[in-house]
Image (tube, rainbow, N blue to C red):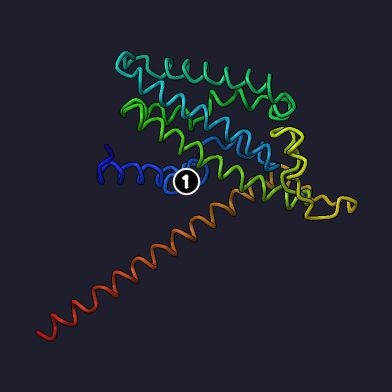
Amino acid sequence: MTTPASASRWRDLCHNALWKQNPGLVQLLGLCPVLAISNTAVNALALGLATTLVTTLSGSAVAAARQWIPNDIRNPVFIIIIATLVTCVDLAMNAWLHGLYLVLGIFIPLITTNCIVLARAEAFASRNSVRAAALDGLMMGLGLTLVLLLLGALREILGKGTLFDGAHLLLGDAGHALVLHLVPAGANYQFLLAMLPPGGFIGLALLIAAKNWLDERARRRAAQRASQSASPISSVASTE
């Protein structure tokens, strides 16, 4: 049975992972795949979902086995668990999503060394229950996936004038129907700066700036509401 206190904890956990401590916009972890693979929305989405699967399963596995892992060798054991799961994901993508597997290349095996996965295993999963660790891993992975998807969509639209190009690599033949040509295909439009690594840095900086602006606006509105609610109390006190 879920109590109000536990429900509040789950909400805080989700909000912390998706927004307050987003791994891509706040903690700035795993920037190598974020900047390298986010040249299209499909590539970014695929890598984000693969990372989400690994963070969820590794968090659950670490939380389940934490009582039997000696403290002195916990990090090597965590890496072995993560590497095993990444190998399974790598083999599965090679078998069933071979075209996408060739595009993502080395960045699937490199999930093993992604700071996000190991950091959540060390900082959260090793200290909490399986359920909490699984939710934390899922939300952290989805937070990264959201950043990857937004960055990939931004760079693809500006760089190629398309959206979801290559969706067939992820969804099969049905993915062809999802491709949007925002610029006519015959125009041969290209903006290389958006597709090259500098475009990744610029796009990520814009996303971080947008998040900081939204946070600042929320703080100002909260302070304004607090001052408005406090003003009637102060006026009553002065009248008395």
Residue occupying the point 49% across, 30% down: 115
Q: Measured from the top left, where is residue 72 in percent x and y?
A: 33, 15
How crowded pointer 1 is (Cα within 10 Å; few <14, some 14-19, many 20+) is rated as some
115 to 191, vertically: above or below: above
Can you tell which quarter of the image residue 237 is in? bottom left
Residue occupying the point 37% across, 14% down: 73
Residue occupying the point 28% across, 40% down: 2
Q: Quadrant of the N terminus?
A: top left
Give the residue number, with chain letter if any, for mark 1: 26
129 to 219, vertically: above or below: above
223 to 58, vertically: above or below: below
Q: Secondary structure at mark 1?
A: loop
Amino acid type at circle 1 is: Val
Identify which residue, 181 or 32, lies in the foreground: 181
Q: Measured from the top left, where is residue 19 in percent x and y?
A: 45, 48
| Residue furthest out toward the bottom | 239
Q: Measured from the top left, where is residue 218 in percent x and y?
A: 41, 62
* Total marks in image: 1
Using residue 164 as the reference point, say whether residue 31 is left or right of it: left
